[in-house]
Amino acid sequence: MTETVSITIDGQAIQARAGQSILEAATAAGIKIPALCHHPALKPIGACRVCLVDIAFERALHPACTYEVRQGIEVHTRSPKAEEARRFALELILSDHPLDCMTCERTGSCELQDLAYQYGIKESQFPGTQHEYALDTSNPFYERDYEKCILCRRCVRTCDEINGVEAIAVIQRGWDSKIGTAFDGIMQDSPCEFCGMCVEVCPTAALQPRLGKQQGRAWEVEKVATTCPYCGVGCQFYLKVKDGRILGVASKWDAPANHGWTCVKGRYGWDFVHHPERLTQPLIRREKGGELEEAGWDEALDLVAQRFKAIVKDHGPQAFGTLASAKCTNEENFAMQKFSRAVIGTNNVDHCARL
Amino acid sequence: MTGLVTAFGSGAMTNSFDDIADEAQVYFIIGSNTTENHPVLGMRLRQAVKQRNAKLIVCDPRAIPIADLATLHIRQKPGTDIALLNGIMHVLIAEGLYDKEFVAERTEGFEDLKAKVMEYPPERAAEITGVPAEQIVEAAHLLAENRPGALLYAMGITQHITGHQNVLSCANLQMLLGNMGVPGGGVNPLRGQNNVQGACDMGGLPNVYPGYQAVTVEAAQKKFEEAWGVPLSNQVGLTLTEMLPLAAEGKIRALYIMGENPMISDPDANHAEHCLRSLDFLVVQDIFLTETAALADVVLPGSSFAEKLGTYTNSERRVQFVNPAVPAPGEARPDWWIIGEIAQRMGYGGLTYASPREIMDEINQLTPSYGGITYDRIGQMGLQWPCPNADHQGTAILHIGRFSRGLGHFGAVDWRPPAEETDEEYPFVFTTGRVLYHYHTGSMTRRSEGLDAIFPEPVVEINAEDAARLEVVDGQPVRISSRRGTIEAEALVSPMTEPGVVFMPFHFAEAAANKLTIAALDPIGKIPQLKVCAVKVETV
């Protein structure tokens, strides 16, 4: 039995699980506490100060993401003191953030933009020097735009707690703090495996996939849950689709085999689907030694059926072999072996399980 | 898979990713470059080591990335796995460290195993494998002291002429340790392709109907004859590795290939090409004009994973949906529809389905382990077979309390040298595999912009010592030849391989590693020895 504790959040009585943070308990109860550095897949660090909440009889505000629930506490997420502190934290972040939402890839799915909208912050009260960083487009998978980085460290924690290669860290200190590899080089020279999990959890457009750029807004995209076509782990994810084209991959955090994690092939390897070399028509070699030429389905299927029948008639079913496929679905493999056995009459059916 | 059937009665990964990642106290990885070939599982194992101090033993001739985190990295010579495993078991038995209770209650054949592994004291195993005897002893102690432990393997175990015995040996080790039928344990073959498990489950094999029902068993034959309304053959068919050579002899006249590329994936590729060219009639159904499709008489455009409905079965036996997200290009069609149309035109109506759901209905009827895996139940989480009926929740861990065959069977096995050994003319051991950024024959990843940009061309890994002797520098093109063929690729001088061993990924048609490999087969599993052959390396 999990131990529970009784708390109230914004006047609502809640049975929280012992060990949960206030943020987790609130989320479970349907109460949304704004947060930026927090991500449910990562350990909390209380860095962004956006989730600060007011706890009765406590002098200071506390980050809801790191504060563990205790019996009887009374939490106010929207008290004037909490809201003021939150707005202050947001204004500080926005004081060093480009306001180019018009062309930004994350418009509509940017967590910072959403909060600026909710709090009506059009411009920061703290204008001043802003960081100027060159856009890093050196790797083929994602761009790094550290002018949009809010130093929430989600990417750093992801690289440590999910992938595990620890390719990036916060480098420098104070105002010069930024996310970088050892010696602040390009990702290819680091242990990065381009799994893209950091890009997935980035709350802004500091990390952006290259594929799908400028091709669709968040609200135009449909998400279709599916299973990865590569190795046998069977990761599931969402394909982001617009107008019959895939624009990207999004994590499916409740997927049973991978719990939202992906590798570089699952995350960025889907574009073969739209490759110009895809076969779009049946092809027939009308004479031995000739070229493959385009044909209609009826011509191709009739030819195949007629030749298959002739070969079985002339040489017997054992002169025939079929290869099912470790890439195709169960249903297609079932159909293929049934074809071999029931239509041709041979058990000469195999696939590349051994290769 | 034949090895696991012999030992346990069921040829599949025994455990699930969750229990392996969360509960194993030690990992024994042999013949699996996990972080590159099953990256997300590799990430989960990394976290197990980092976050909860699980122990990790990696047995691999190469310094594969996951070995960086290993408690112990054993670098056995390619093709010496049985000697290594027997050596470890020798220590476990000689020092009385094995699980005596488990062995007594759950297994048979222990005395035979004991007699055999007693022939492999660590010193002898060390001599064969090139691994220091102390490491063999240390591995045994780590395994005995940290329980449960999960054994993971992939093609590095199976692609040898002794592949079947290699698998038996893995099964022996885990039974000896009592690591079977428990969370965090098991013998876990990692399947290299998204649906290789499903293709086997569905009877895409010459000896079994769906659900591993043998074609030679009369009851099974009758059952399928009744269901499909035609007489069926009770003669075991040919494997792919047997069909191709017979094509060259004129005994196989026609091949119908769906979504496979044997021109790149098969051993001794030059010979494979000759065989395919000898056919009277070749039909290839694929999404690209692969090297194999280019030889076909008819090419039929199939659909990619993003364009169709169906199910895949992953390594942990979990059946999951693949869903249509975009329309197929041009006239491309789902593969099940194409098969049904050909059957129809040959006068057989039993393959004309309205949808994949209808096919799954038939699978549910005819495949006991899939009996309860219906479209209405798969949902978001999938279902793991065996799942015999609609009330069953699926099976996360096999062999709890009892093996599928009753008692687990110890099969005592001997080490045998590989089918081709190095000599003066061909002094290097050549071994093949995959890299993180590419997949199998490359027909998908070579056509993915990012993946092909980051790893654009074939390389051959060579140790610095060998490179210095051959006067080869990093990035220099070299010629690699075996008795069967010659290819050229850039040298990647690295500590990944030990002196005397060169490694090449097999994804690249322009330097197809399989032009060099040998078509020698494991006589039981019929798996070719892709992991070892002899080559020479020369400057170009």
Image (tube, coloured by chain):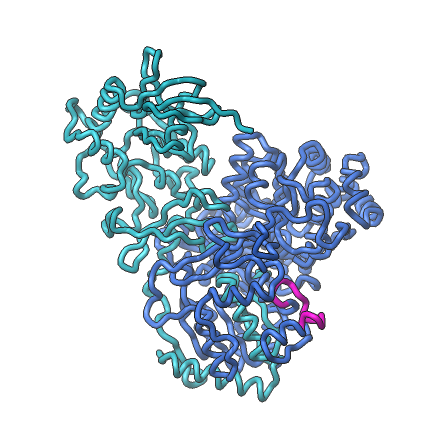
Chain colours: A cyan, B blue
Q: Is residue A116 left or right of residue B341?
A: left
Q: Is residue B6 left or right of residue B515?
A: right
Q: Is residue A50 left or right of residue B256?
A: left
Image location (x, y in percent) of residue A181: 37, 33
Image location (x, y in percent) of residue A196: 38, 43
Residue at horizontal 28 percent and vertical 55 percent from the top:
A242
Q: Does residue B182 show up magenta in the picture?
A: no
Stretch in magenta: B209-221
Image location (x, y in percent) of residue A17: 47, 27
Q: Please tell me whether residue B233 is drawn above or below residue B6 in the rendered image.
A: below
**Quadrant of the image occupied by residue B184:** top right
Residue B428 appearing in the image: no
Say which of B334 and B6 sits in front: B334
Q: Is residue A259 left or right of residue B400?
A: left
Residue at horizontal 57 percent and vertical 50 percent from the top:
B393
Residue at horizontal 54 percent and vertical 67 percent from the top:
B362
Q: Please tell me whether residue A300 is drawn above or below residue A272 in the rendered image.
A: below
**Quadrant of the image occupied by residue B136:** top right
Residue at horizontal 67 percent and vertical 52 percent from the top:
B79
Say which of A326 and A250 sits in front: A250
